[in-house]
Image (tube, rainbow, N blue to C red):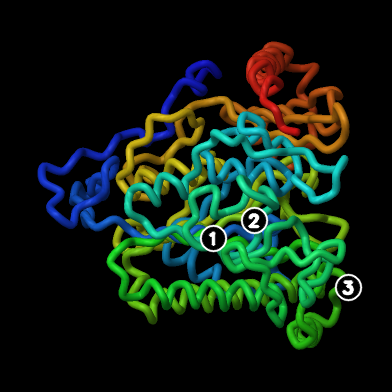
Amino acid sequence: MPLGCLLAAVCACSTPPRAATDAGADGPADGAVPVDARTPDGDTVAAARPNILVILVDDLGYGDLSSYGAQDLMTPAVDRLATEGMRFTDFHSNSPVCSPTRAALLTGRFPDLVGVPGVIRQTAGNTWGNLADDATTLAQLLRDAGYHTAHVGKWHLGFDPPDTPLDRGFTFFHGFLADMMDDYYTHRRFGVNWMRLNRDEVDPVGHATDVFTDWAIDYLAERRDQPEPFFLYLAYNAPHVPIQPPADWLQRVQEREPNLSLPRASIAALIEHLDDGIGRVLQALAENGQRDNTLVILASDNGGELDVGASNGPLRGGKENMWEGGIRVPAIARWPGHVAPGTTSGAVFMTMDIFATALEAAAIQYGGAAESRSFLPVLLGRETAAPARDIFFVRREAPGGVHYGARNGDTMLVQNVADGPFMLYNLAADLGETTDLSTAEPTRLQQLTSALQQHRQIADTIPWQ
């Protein structure tokens, strides 16, 4: 799809949900209608709006789950989620680094179009984004449609109003405002405590993965008997550096896999501990009676960091670059009774598409600017492929330094040096991106670079400082 059409299009689904004839006194708020999606057999799914749980993990490599081919670690909770729902094999983050992907998830937009082309940090002179004040978030839209909205865990999109979760549509926040933690137990960044309960500073005890898991479980328990559906955005720090698993988890991995190097054993233990936390959250859903009416979407914010032991499986590169190892990520969705269990999809979607998917599942029609496309039709078995379109990946990190990736179909354009040369790959024939086709296929190169140039003509006008 041409870029101009993308920017003018609404985010909504391929088939908008039909309005109900009578919502009733307890029906949805303005802008929301009951779900009227259909299964592959033509049956109408339940009209009740689902709870929505989005779990975003940090720097999890494409090859670092058992269900994605890992042989030296065990992730039974996430693997079970995959067997109960759909596993995506060609899902991408919007960026090979943290903040832009988070901005894309919450706004349904390419992150450089909402002022977040790079990582937001607390250090002046080393921060590369500022979420646009007029950006509309998924939390705002769900809240306005009657959802209770909560964010637990890592925020990484701003430190002060109007850039905190409570300013961006979340009714409840229990988490960490900054980027990485210097220590998983003290929860500080450069000596500053960024842990908050709503706007109040808190100082919890324990490993950050356990802290966020407990907070998420507490929230789910509080929502157990409430009439409104909830949207919980649970963002873990793990397995981001520092690679600091609890000692007993590391010992367990080392006893089971004695030949692993210490770096690989450590990140495997951190991931297994994370998997255990995710399993506890999913178990809480079941115990609260919330499992069957909750759409769960799990993804990583970018690829794994190779120099600390992560694995991106067969993919080239890792975090911070535009090869597939930096942007192709694990992604799984489960909605009991709606998503056929044990299914796999090779459809090409991005983190920003969670925005449109959640809105369609909640039967919310949104006419604002967004490039997001819903993958709910794929989840429900109505479609097998994503809409045809150009997609873009961005990372800004130094003054004047921004580099991009672009994709259309199986063709991937890669720029790994700021304003540097472009490489071209055919991912269907060359998943490992070993053969640069930029010279052999000049027409295809020109098509993607022209699309990217059109995108940048808009993105370069968006303030990010």
* Residue 182 visible in the snapshot: yes
Residue at point 71%, 27% (across, down): 413
Q: Position of residue 169 (x, y in %)?
A: 49, 50
Measured from the top left, where is residue 274 in percent x and y? 65, 72
Which residue in the structure is indicated by mark 2?
A: 155
State the separation of the CA atoms marked 3 and 1: 36 Å
Nearest the camera: 188 or 59? Answer: 188
Q: Secondary structure at mark 3?
A: loop
Q: Earlier in the sequence, mark 3 or mark 2?
A: 2
- Looking at the rendered image, the quarter that the C terminus falls into is top right
25 lies above or below 439: below
Which label was assigned to residue 454?
none
Give, as a three-letter code, the residue at label 3. Answer: Ser
Circle 3 packing at 10 Å, graded few (<14), some (14-19), many (20+), is few
- Nearest the viewer among 291 and 181 is 181
User: Looking at the rendering, which quadrant does residue 407 occupy?
Assistant: top right
Across and down, in percent, residue 166 comes to 54, 54
The Cα–Cα distance between marks 2 and 1, rounded to whole angstroms, is 8 Å
Sort mark 1 into few (<14), some (14-19) or many (20+) by Cα contacts within 10 Å. many
Q: Is there a contact, CB below 8 Å, between mark 2 and mark 1? A: yes
Amino acid marked by disc 2: Trp
Give the number of the disc on residue 261: 3
Whether residue 105 sits left or right of residue 74 in the image: it is: left
Labels 3 and 1: the sequence-earlier one: 1
Q: Which residue is mark 1?
A: 151
